[in-house]
């Protein structure tokens, strides 16, 4: 998920730094995005100069500390509450001046992710619909203690990336999964 979010952010004009705890994954993601853009150029679906610009805005980061000067840091780690909580606990020092900390999740409680943090108001959910480059919708999820300005900022950034933001409450599975369940319900 992080790779495709990096893709749409770079395409929207943002300078993007990729980081993964596995250094080889960072390089592979950058190479995969470059290949994707090259393929679109070859098919005539993307201007070559635009592809060059997208690639130039994509940079690897060797450590989390290399992200300290980024305006926004979006996590896209495994969908496990303990892992996300641990990461956000580490971020509390490293990114203490960041206005918001979006968590990429399709089902975890934003309130639970922010619990125990000094500034839980900075934590919000960002749930992109798949496939991200084609499905232009992202849920912006407020936890019980999320500041309104956090969601406002994430909503605006979603628009800058060419997506339609929808506000969601911190309930199990958010909007898209509820709608999917209703559509998949067997008839009687």
Image: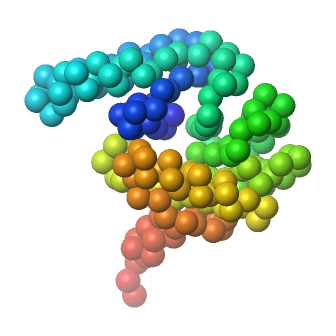
Q: Position of residue 103 (x, y in %)?
A: 64, 45
Looking at the image, residue 128 lies above or below residue 71: below
The quarter of the image holding the C terminus is bottom left
Q: Which residue sits at x=35%, y=34%?
A: 11
- Comparing 19 with 172, the one in front is 19
Q: Position of residue 47 (x, y in %)?
A: 17, 27
Colour basis: rainbow
Q: Position of residue 131 (x, y in %)?
A: 36, 46
Q: Which residue sits at x=54%, y=23%?
A: 17
Looking at the image, residue 172 lies above or below residue 115: below
Q: Position of residue 25 (x, y in %)?
A: 52, 18
| Quadrant housing residue 66 | top right
Looking at the image, residue 146 lies above or below residue 48: below
| Quadrant housing residue 80 | top right
Left or right, residue 25 beside residue 123: left
Q: Which residue sits at x=72%, y=19%?
A: 65
Looking at the image, residue 10 lies above or below residue 118: above
- Comparing 145 with 33, the one in front is 145
Q: Can see residue 4?
A: no
| Quadrant housing residue 38 | top left
Left or right, residue 34 beside residue 174: left
Q: Which residue sits at x=50%, y=27%?
A: 16
Left or right, residue 134 beside residue 46: right
Residue at the far left: name it. 44
- Comparing 142 with 175, the one in front is 142
Q: Can see residue 101?
A: yes
């Amino acid at each position: 998920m992080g790779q495709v979010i990096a893709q749409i952010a770079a395409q929207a004009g943002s300078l993007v730094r990729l980081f993964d705890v596995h250094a080889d994954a960072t390089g592979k993601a950058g190479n995969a995005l470059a290949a994707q853009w090259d393929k679109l150029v070859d098919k005539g679906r993307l201007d070559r100069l635009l592809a060059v610009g997208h690639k130039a805005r994509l940079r690897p980061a060797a450590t989390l500390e290399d992200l300290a000067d980024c305006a926004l840091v979006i996590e896209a780690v495994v969908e496990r509450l303990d892992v996300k909580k641990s990461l956000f606990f580490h971020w509390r020092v490293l990114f203490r001046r960041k206005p918001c900390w979006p968590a990429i999740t399709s089902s975890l409680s934003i309130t639970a992710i922010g619990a125990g943090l000094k500034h839980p108001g900075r934590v919000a959910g960002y749930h992109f619909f798949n496939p991200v480059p084609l499905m232009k919708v992202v849920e912006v999820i407020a936890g019980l203690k999320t500041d309104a300005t956090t969601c406002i900022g994430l909503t605006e950034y979603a628009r800058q990336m060419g997506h339609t933001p929808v506000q969601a409450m911190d309930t199990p599975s958010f909007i898209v999964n509820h709608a999917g369940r209703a559509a998949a319900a067997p008839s009687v």
